Structures are given as C-alpha cells and as structure tokens.
Amino acid sequence: MKKEFFKYAIPSALAMFISSLYTVIDGIFVGQGVGDSALAAVNIVLPFTVMLFGLASMFAIGGGALVSKNIGANNVKKAVNIFRQVFKSLLIFSLIISIVCILFTTPIVSMLGATEVLKPLAVEYLRFYALFCIPNLVGIVLNSFVRNDGRPKLAMVSTISGAITNIILDYIFIFQLGMGIKGAAIATGLGQIVTVSIVLPHFIMKKGYLSFGNVKVSFKTVKEFCTIGFPSFFAQGSYSIIVLLHNIALVKYAGEMGVSAYSILNYITTNIYMVLYGITLGVQPLVSYNYGKKDVEKMLGFFRITSISNIIITGFFVIISFVFGPSLISIFTNDTQIAQMAYAALKIACLSYFAVGLNLNSLVYYQAIEIPKYSNLSCILRSIVYLPICLFILGRFFGINGIWASAIVSETLTFITIKLVGNIKSYTFTPIHIFKQILLIYSFCLAIFILSF
C-alpha cells in the first residue's frame, strides 16, 4: 500500500510544488521587474484565476473518480466514454470563458475590488491570461487523467516542463523585452501549451486505457461528474472568496500596502497549499479504484497515510516559514515596511495549514467515494460562514494581526465541524488519533499566536 501511495502521491505533490514554484517565480519577476503595484494587481486577479483552476479541477476529479471506479470494476468501455465526454465538455466551457474574459475584462476586475491605481494593470494581466484559457484548463485536466490512466510520472514531467518554460519566458518577456505584466500572463499560457503537448501523445497514441474520440455528450453523465467534482470547484472558489475577503479587509485596515503584503504571503503559502493538494489528488485515483473494487481496507489505509503525510509536511513548512521567512520575502520586495508586514502575516498564517491539509484530504476523499455533500459543506463553512465572522471579530479586536489569524480559526472550526457532522467513521473509518493530533497541534499554534502580539 505504501508503495502505491508513494508511486502516485510523490509525483503529484512534486508536480504541484513545481507548478506553484513557477507561480512564486512569476511573482518575483513581477515584483522586481514591474513593481509592487503590479504584484498587488496580480493578487486582485487571483480569485478569478483560482476559480478557473477550480473549474478544471471539477472536470478532472469528478471525471477521474468515475473513470478510476469503472476501471476498477473492469468496465473500461464506460470509463473511456466518460473521459471523452469530459474532454469535449471542457473544450466548450474553456472557449466560452476565454471569450467572456476578453470582452468583459474591465467589469470583472472592478467586481474583484481593484482600486483606480491597480485597475489598468489588473485589466492588462487578465486580458492576456484569458487568451490562453483553453491550454490552461486542458493542461490541468489531461494531467489528472494521465494519473488516472496509470502514468503519474508523465503528469509530473509535463507539469515540470511547462513550469520551466514559464520561468524562462518570464525572464525574457519581463526583463529582456520589457513587456511588463502582460509578459507574465503570456509566459504562463505558453508554459501550459508545452504541458499539453507532452501529455497529448499518451491519448492520441492510445498508450493506456483512455483515448480521444468523437462522442455524444450526455447530460446525465455531465451532471454526474460535475456533481462529484463540484466540491473541487467549490474548494478553489472558496479560496477565491477567502482571498477576496482578505483583500477587502486589508484595504480597510492597511490600504494597498496591506494588499501587497498579502500578495507576497499568497505567493509563499501557495507552495504548501499545492503540495498538500497534490498529495490528495495523487491518492484520489487509488481511493476511487479501490472504491470500484469495494476494497474498504485499502481505501481507509490511503486516507490515513495521506492525513499523516499532510501533518508532517505542514510542520516542515512552518519551520521554514519562521526561520527563512525574511529571506523569502525579501525576494519579492525591497520595501522594508511591506516586508515586515508580510513576515508578521507569514508567522501566523502558516499555522493554519495543519487544518488545511486535513480539510483537503477529507474533501477529496468524500469525492472519491462519491459522497460530495460533505465536501461542499466544508467549502461553505471555511469561506462563507466561519471566515467572514473571524475576519470581522478578530479584525475589530486585534487589527491586522487578527486578519492574519482568521484563517487559523476558520480552518480549525471547519475541521472540527466536518468531523462531528460528516463523521467519515460512518462511511469508512477515521483514526481517532488524527483528531487528537490536530487539537494538540492547535493548542501549540494558539500559544505561538498569543506570543506574536
């Protein structure tokens, strides 16, 4: 079981880490090559780009769960049919989104809360990003299906290749050609084209179970994979809401400088988020496959290993944040005040990822066993219910430090609520010591938070 876990989880986590790393480098180039205002403008657009990633994840995980389950049940023909319907539906959605974003860029940016200073830069970034909606979304989905089709290393190679391409083009477009913020958007799009070009031969040359082909899209099938995958879209959507709510609160308490500091925080914490998410995505095919085989023992084992792995990885990230935080932040900005604000934010916010990792694992696990209602509940609680309350109360009493701490409280409350209400034990089994571990960890986190004031 451990061998299977490492075979799927490690390449997925590594691919996600590299993917997030090029996002960080993208931020470095934008911050150093264009300026702090451009960095803030990218952060304004972030909720929208994250929503697009969520849409792709919905297709990938929803379709992937059905595909893996049917392969596990030896119904390969149905699995191939589902894959083709997912891909055809994705192309239609991607084209529509691209057109809408290009035509209505300014209203979209205004809705995201851009100030008059940031609006021109945000519009320029989103418009050029939208030109590459199709490869951006297709790259994410095909990578996921390659993992479901038994080739996790190919998914890793394609992601890393796209990331390296993005980094090289970032440097050329921003520093050598002086293309500014649009150069970053174009580099991202071209990087995704490289990713797609690497995974396409797997399906074209039929190197696995899955292949391309003409198929009639069934509303019933679309509804089925969207229902299962919706929590992934909701998870990214809730993250977008989290970023949006933080931006609004920070404009009130710290102005554009606070948004810039939060932008740096997002660039750094994106790494841990994507690694944790990558592990859960990597394990999803294994859970879905064994769900199709009705092998409960293996399903439970993969859930447990993933939970423990996420706790260990987050602990390592917390140490790095405290020890090397100032050095990491200095890469993004030369402004001392913004750097100090970002480090204060990082020391507090990094602690929330103990609960984030476990919440992500539960979310994807429920999708893999086709019980998405608790995944949706988790997203609602963390972004729409608990976070606004925490931002309002903690922001009012503790100011900007309260804003940074809101994620700790909201994610912890979400974790506890899902364990009490959803109770995975009713469907499979959750080792009770994991619950005890998270409570002990957060007692420690609370002590650090109090000492940070």
Image (cartoon, rainbow, N blue to C red):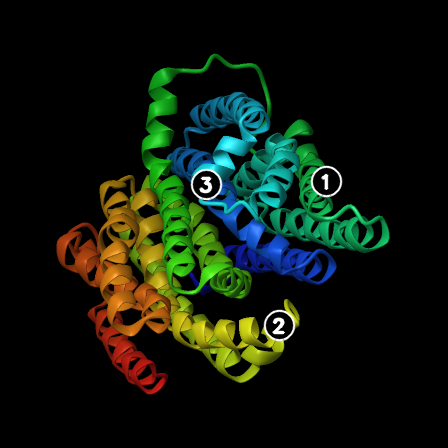
Residue 63 seen in this snapshot = yes
Query: Against 238, is 392 above or below?
Result: below
In percent of width and height, residue 124 lies at 64, 39
Q: Nearer the viewer, residue 124 or 358?
A: 124
Which amino acid does the dot numbered 2 rest on?
Asp
Comparing labels 2 and 1, the label whose residue is closer to the camera: 2
Q: Nearer the viewer, residue 14 or 325?
A: 325
- The quarter in which the N terminus is drawn is bottom left
Q: Is residue 138 left or right of residue 58?
A: right
Query: Against 297, is 434 above or below?
Result: below
Which amino acid does the dot numbered 3 rest on?
Met
Which numbered marker is on residue 51? 3
When asked about the image quadrant of residue 434, the answer is bottom left
Whole-number angstrom distance, CA of label 2 to CA of label 1? 31 Å
Whole-number angstrom distance, CA of label 1 to CA of label 3? 20 Å
Q: Dot 1: few (<14), some (14–19), or many (≥20) neighbours within 10 Å?
A: some
Residue at screen point 26% across, 48% down: 384
What residue is disc 1 on?
190
What residue is disc 2 on?
335
Residue at screen point 36% across, 47% down: 238
When asked about the image quadrant of residue 35, the answer is bottom right
In percent of width and height, residue 331 lies at 66, 71
